[in-house]
Image (tube, grey):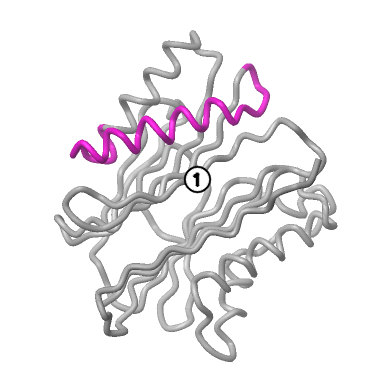
Amino acid sequence: MELQAAISKVDQFSSSEQGDKVEIIERPRGGISIIMAEGKLGGRHSRTIAMKAVHSIMSLIASGLHDGAASRIVLSNIIEEHKGKAQVNLNIISCDLESQSIVITKNNTTPVVTVFEGIAEYLRFDGIIDADHSSSPSVFQFEIEEGRDFILVSDGILQAGAQYEQPLDLRVLVESLFEDDEPTVQAMADAILTQAISQDLGRPRDDMTVTVLRISPSPTNNIRREYVHFPINEP
């Protein structure tokens, strides 16, 4: 088997107040974790809060702490430090080779899509995310299954087009990508992001982040690869 992952993101159009942050790390006992966070301070977007949350969680996971425990510590610390004025929407997806499972940690209701044999479904979680979830994320665990994709998105993707009465149907879009052939994880992430931007008429009304994780049955040659494409705007 082979683990494949891709991330695509874009900032809110013409705004200096971005709040999305996403990072990928290797787990200390095998596997990877992708951490997505959207920070707000006093009701306004805050990349500083998001970066603080992501980097702190990365450090705790790297030290061997489980995702749920790491998340609760960091979220509680941020709320306490900023006296309740800071908020973080958190999504973590991990392929944990120690437990041989996919672990999803969330403190929000933005849906997760899973794809198997070209059929996309919203995951049905065996739990309820409470209304007061700011510092108490829920953790969901799934068996590693060959050929299955997991797609996590920020609320900027979920709400794309709503302002113009043309909301994005994420499940239908994902299934359309499999009509001819299985897309790569990067092609899938790019296609979802591109369509979301289009739904917002080319001007994203919020930060948008897409993360795709796939358990591929393809044989691996044990080579690990990472690619980064990061735009640099000229002054």
For the point 30% across and 74% down, the residue is 2
| Residue 198 vs residue 175, the one in the foreground | 198
Residue 39 % position (x, y): 56, 30
Instruction: Decide whether residue 222 is among the magenta residues.
Output: no
Outermost residue toward the top in this view: 83
| Residue 200 vs residue 61, the one in the foreground | 61
Tag 1: amino acid = Val
| Residue 204 vs residue 10, the one in the foreground | 10
| Residue 89 vs residue 51, the one in the foreground | 51
Residue 199 % position (x, y): 78, 59
Quarter of the image where one finds residue 80: top left
- Lateral position of residue 220 relative to residue 114, left or right: left
Does 65 sit above or below residue 146? above
Does 93 sit above or below residue 52? below
Q: Secondary structure at mark 1?
A: strand
Disc 1 packing (10 Å; few <14; some 14–19; many ≥20): many
For the point 40% across and 50% down, the residue is 24
Residue annotated with mark 1: 22
- Lateral position of residue 167 relative to residue 2, left or right: right
First to last magenta residue range: 42-69
Residue 85 % position (x, y): 56, 14
Residue 14 % position (x, y): 82, 40
Does 46 sit above or below residue 204? above
Is the stretch drawn in magenta largely helix, strand or loop?
Answer: helix
For the point 71% across and 64% down, the residue is 194
Outermost residue toward the bottom in this view: 180
Outermost residue toward the front in this view: 235
Quarter of the image where one finds residue 32: bottom left
Does 35 sit above or below residue 60? below
Q: Quadrant of the N terminus?
A: bottom left
Q: Quadrant of the C terminus?
A: top right
Instruction: Decide whether residue 57 is among the magenta residues.
Output: yes
